[in-house]
Image (cartoon, grey):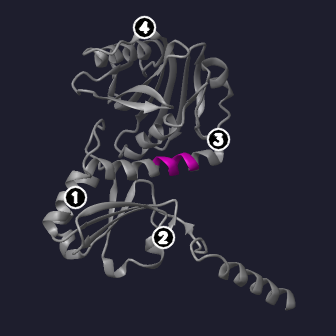
Amino acid sequence: MRRTLLLVFTVFTLISCGDGKNDRIIFDSAGKINDVSVVIDNTMWDGRVGEAIRNVLSSPIYGLPQDEPIFSINQIPSSVFDGFITKSRTILKVEMGKPAGVTYKNNVYAKPQRVVIVSGQNKDEIIQQVSDNASKIVDVFKNIEIYEKQRLIKKTLYNSKTLTEKLGLKINFHSGYRVAKEEDDFIWIRRDINTGTLNLMIYELPFDAITKTDSTVRQIIKIRDSIGKMHIAGPTEGSYMITENAYTPFHSEIILDNKPTLETKGLWDIKNAFMSGPFINYAIEDKINNRWVVVEGFAFAPSVEKRNHIFELESIIKSIKIE
């Protein structure tokens, strides 16, 4: 009994001490990957403000064979936003009657957590703020979701020593994956799922294999088609993976591992067979080693939604570290 009282007194003392700034207990955040809680009153959610928010957070992802939203939305009226509900990892709050603006906060109710507060004196100002800051809002939420997915993957890491030895890089993927094919400059990694497979291809190219011109996308597609023909055989003799010609690939330039990177998203197909799915291709400019490192994820998951499968592959790819 005395020990219990002493323990309670000690804990109470520790909590009571300090300057009042860092004595708050922060709980772990919760929620499914790519779910966003939107705190907004029902009347605004059913009207123009809600429509503007949905147009941003639920816009379809480019590069999937069917329309799927960037995020799934859980709408929460302000009056019930309390307790466990506040522990969501991603929260967008709408505050009417305040100066127009967008505020980004970290770990307000839980950790890790990003809270985006959109404010305005009236509905038109709020809608304008949502529209003007759409890209940043999406990026803020997506970045923390990638961080969370990478954190979960690290719990059961696959020993990727082979990648370091053969290609001079590290990448984090969990132990559910296996090496399906391994050569000196090419590795194919895959994981079985209920409806198909998730796949990663990692290979290197000479530095002059890709030049940044108006034809860069065509160069990348030509390379991935040659890699598919060489390494990714289909279910029947003479079949192999190619890029679907009817779907224009999305192309942009980003930074990965502090290096310029060409990002390409589109649909793959199997020549002479009825199989297809989405892919994401990252060509990383590795000037120090005089090469391009290409990492591609592609999913085969017929008849089911593919957003979270591609998101898993993207999260894995974005963990890459080139030595």
Say what amino acid the circle numbered 1 marks: Gln
Foreground: 139 or 221? 139
Measure the alpha-carbon separation of dots 3 and 4: 34 Å
Helix, strand or loop at mark 1: helix
| Residue holding disc 1 | 129
| Residue holding disc 4 | 208
| Total marks placed | 4
Q: Which is nearer the N-term, disc 3 or disc 4?
A: 3
Q: Which is nearer the N-term, disc 1 or disc 4?
A: 1
Q: Which is nearer the N-term, disc 3 or disc 1?
A: 1
Q: Which is nearer the N-term, disc 2 or disc 3?
A: 2
Say what amino acid the circle numbered 3 marks: Leu
Q: Is 12 included in the stretch rendered in magenta? A: no
Measure the alpha-carbon separation of dots 3 and 1: 41 Å
**Does 80 appear above or below 209?**
below
Residue depicted at x 44% and y 15%: 227
- Rendering quarter of residue 169: top right
Measure the alpha-carbon separation of dots 1 and 4: 44 Å
Foreground: 141 or 54? 141
| Residue holding disc 2 | 109
| Residue holding disc 3 | 157
Q: Which is nearer the N-term, disc 4 or disc 2?
A: 2
